[in-house]
């Protein structure tokens, strides 16, 4: 079971499905790949459904627990009804966050907001001479954004 049908979730759903795993994707929003054009979402879902991936859109994960070494997920659909999904493993593809809390930024006085390092237009932090780039700053978490 993959939680989150953004680019990372769909990438992994496709990979595991091609390895022969039965994959179920759970997405809170009405369509997969919600940042893409609706036509892309629709065509991708058709294509991946042919590849035997199951989709639950407008399905909010309410609870996740391990029972008898299996994952048991409770999801609420758009009508507020709750369904149970059982899976061998689950992957959370929607909660990437910067891991900056234990690297001593506080000792240096570097400002962060919800873990993201605050920078100016030159990527300099509030401490002169200390710069930050990549997913730790509040820009789009993409490789080409990380190094530009
Ligand atoms: C599954 C997936 C698919 C993606 N696909 C795309 C894509 O198709 N196109 C795209 O543009 N972007 C993609 N991204 C996003 C892209 O990978 C990131 O935006 C990019 O890697 C950010 O670069 P970074 O250098 O900030 O961080 P990272 O590439 O994550 O590099 C940080 C490195 O620092 C190491 N590290 C962390 N903490 C410490 C520490 N305390 N001490 C020492 N080392 C540490 C980590 O182990 C890691 O190797 C994808 C991301 C994921 C997760």
Image (cartoon, helix red, strand yellow):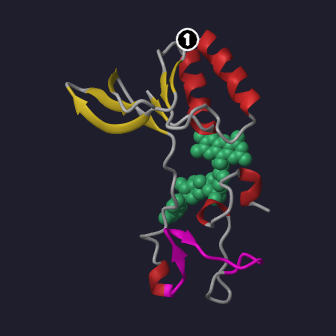
For image coordinates 72% across by 21% down, the residue present is 43
Left or right of 138? Residue 96 is left
Q: Is residue 44 left or right of residue 88?
A: right
* Residue 120 covered by magenta stretch: yes
Q: Position of residue 147 (x, y in %)?
A: 76, 60
Q: What residue is rendered at 68% in x and 86% in y?
A: 129
User: Residue 91 in magenta?
Assistant: no
Position above or below: 58 against 108: above
Q: Is residue 112 above or below residue 54?
A: below
Q: Which residue is mark 1?
A: 52
Q: Dividing the image into 4 quarters, which one contains the C terminus?
A: bottom right
The quadrant the N terminus occupies is top left
Most common SS among magenta residues:
loop
Question: Percent position (x, y) of residue 80?
Answer: 37, 33
Which residue extends farthest right? 148
User: Considering depth in this image, is 81 or 31 the residue closer to the camera?
Assistant: 81
Which residue is farthest left?
68
Q: Secondary structure at mark 1?
A: loop
Q: Which residues are magenta?
A: 108-124
In percent of width and height, residue 94 lies at 51, 44
**Among the 4 quarters of the image, the one containing residue 81:** top left
Up/down of 19 relative to 58, above or below: above
Q: Is residue 22 left or right of residue 13?
A: left
Which residue occupies 63% across, 17% down? 48
Q: Quadrant of residue 11?
A: top right
Q: Residues within 10 Å of mark 1 (few under 14, many from 20)?
A: some
- In the figure, residue 66 lies in which quadrant? top left
The answer to whether residue 26 is left or right of residue 148 is: left
- Residue farthest along the front direction in this orientation: 79
Q: Nearer the viewer, residue 105 or 8?
A: 8
């Amino acid at each position: 079971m993959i939680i989150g049908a953004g680019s990372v979730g769909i990438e992994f759903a496709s990979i595991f499905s091609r390895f022969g795993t039965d994959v179920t994707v759970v997405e809170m929003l009405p369509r997969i790949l919600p940042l893409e054009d609706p036509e892309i979402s629709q065509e991708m879902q058709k294509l991946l459904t042919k590849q035997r991936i199951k989709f639950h859109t407008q399905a909010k994960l309410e609870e996740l627990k391990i029972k008898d070494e299996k994952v048991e997920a409770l999801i609420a659909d758009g009508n507020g009804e709750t369904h149970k999904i059982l899976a061998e493993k689950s992957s959370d593809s929607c909660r990437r966050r910067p891991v900056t809390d234990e690297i001593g930024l506080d000792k240096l006085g570097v400002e962060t907001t919800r873990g993201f390092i605050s920078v100016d237009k030159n990527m300099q932090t509030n401490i002169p001479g200390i710069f930050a780039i990549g997913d730790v700053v509040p820009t789009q978490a993409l490789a080409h954004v990380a190094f530009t």
